[in-house]
Amino acid sequence: MQRYAYALPAEQELTARPRKIIRLTSFRLILLGFAGLILAGALLLMLPVSVRSGNMVTFSDALFTSVSAVCVTGLVVRDTASFWTPFGQAVLLLLIQIGGLGVVTFAVAIAQMSGRKVSLRQRTTMQEAVSAPQLGGMVPLTGMILRGTLLIEGVGALLLLPVFLPAYGLRGIWAAVFHAVSAFCNAGFDILGTPESPFVSLTGYAADPLLCGTVMLLIITGGLGFLTWEDLRRNGLHIHRYHTQTKVILAAAALLILLPALFFFLTDLRDAPAGTRLLEALFQSVTARTAGFNTVDLTFMRSGSLAVLIVLMLIGGAPGSTAGGMKITTFVILLANMAAVLFHREDAQLFGRRVDRKTIRTASALFGIYLLLFAGGALLISTAEQLPLDECLFETASAIGTVGLSLSLTPTLGAFSRAVLMFLMFFGRVGGLTMFYAAISAGDHRSSHLPVETISVG
């Protein structure tokens, strides 16, 4: 058989160039996973079966609610209990559960249960999703996360049953399960509102120690991070064996609960008896990082207390947890670096260990990014809606920290301001570095060392 060879014309040879292939890095997979889940959730919420009779849902409302659920934030434009049917609430709960665990963690868990082998790429993506320091042990860690989550949420639901069963009958079972999952995932969604009293959160249970205590424990457990769980499981009460990161998270979390609670108790919430005041102060301190439930009307809190809440919302929870925000470790590393500068130390130190300078640079960059987006978002909303800047700052801190606390501002906002909040929620849940690394192509960014120049600061 005779073969023929075909050649491109000279012009085509000159113009033909290899196509640029977009690689789906771990960061891009995480980003696309969350985005796909949000879109699927919005479409499900637009189904007639998701909305109670007499209500009309727009794509804007469905999309905002889906973003808030997947990003475990809790900011809502429609009251969850009175607007969505049990089916719609179940969709929200599924979105909260997947968003809390992480899309990648959930996908790897499903692969494990179906008997499929977890690929190296899935393990790498899982490592990025939970902020693990090394690739080894990702599959056992995934199993531990799934089992631990189901166990903790199940125990939480059982503890909440005595609260909800007498008040709601059989519907109390659903309420117990919904709030246990929402609390552990630091989501802040509730199903206690009515058409006459929407957006009530847990204000009717401010003096109930069982409900408040259970919800606080679920929030704290979910916000400590999966790697902290693993460290505690392995080493028990042998504190000296804990990783430095675990010690930082536990110590900082304790201080960030107790000190703000003491501030709230001494300066605010004066109308309630001492016992209730203490419970309210503790609850608001815990929920601000980053759960979104509230037992008091935040619009009646003093400006100083609201400022403290904003700081707590921006700090957030631990890396690799169900919580969002800038993260406790970022905040502590910045403080350690500040102390090193003030006391003329060469390196930042934590628990007898030196903090890597690359980590300090990353923490400083994250802090700057979160601060710019938090303030810039508030400025945009304030300008667009003609609203006081301080109220807008509270909403944007709640969004970027994936908290869900609100001064009743979010339901009144227009389409542009909602878009700003949705971006902030997505940024806060996916993570600033993930979004930037997903947008910037990997490559060799090394450069020669430039001459050093001294610039005065301070």
Image (spheres, grey):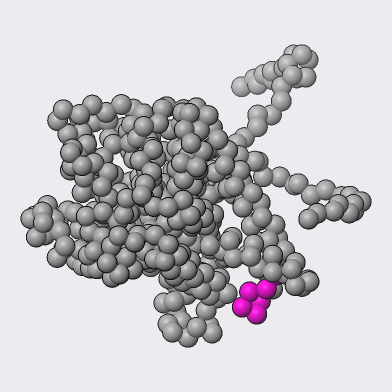
The C terminus lies in quadrant: bottom right
Name which residue lies at 41% across and 77% down: 233
As drawn, 74 above or below 218? above
Residue 180 lies in quadrant: bottom left
Name which residue lies at 52% across and 79% down: 242
Residue 270 lies in quadrant: bottom left
Name which residue lies at 20% across and 42% down: 197
Look at the image and give the residue range highlighted in magenta: 347-353
As drawn, 445 above or below 141? above
Residue 2 on image: x %, y %: 64, 20
Residue 220 lies in quadrant: bottom left
Residue 213 on image: x %, y %: 29, 68
Q: Is residue 45 visible?
A: yes
Q: Residue furthest front?
A: 271
Q: Does 351 appear in magenta?
A: yes
The N terminus lies in quadrant: top right
Q: Does 156 appear in magenta?
A: no
Residue 141 on image: x %, y %: 43, 66
Front-most of 276 and 292? Answer: 276
Position of residue 448 in the picture relative to residue 56 (left or right): right
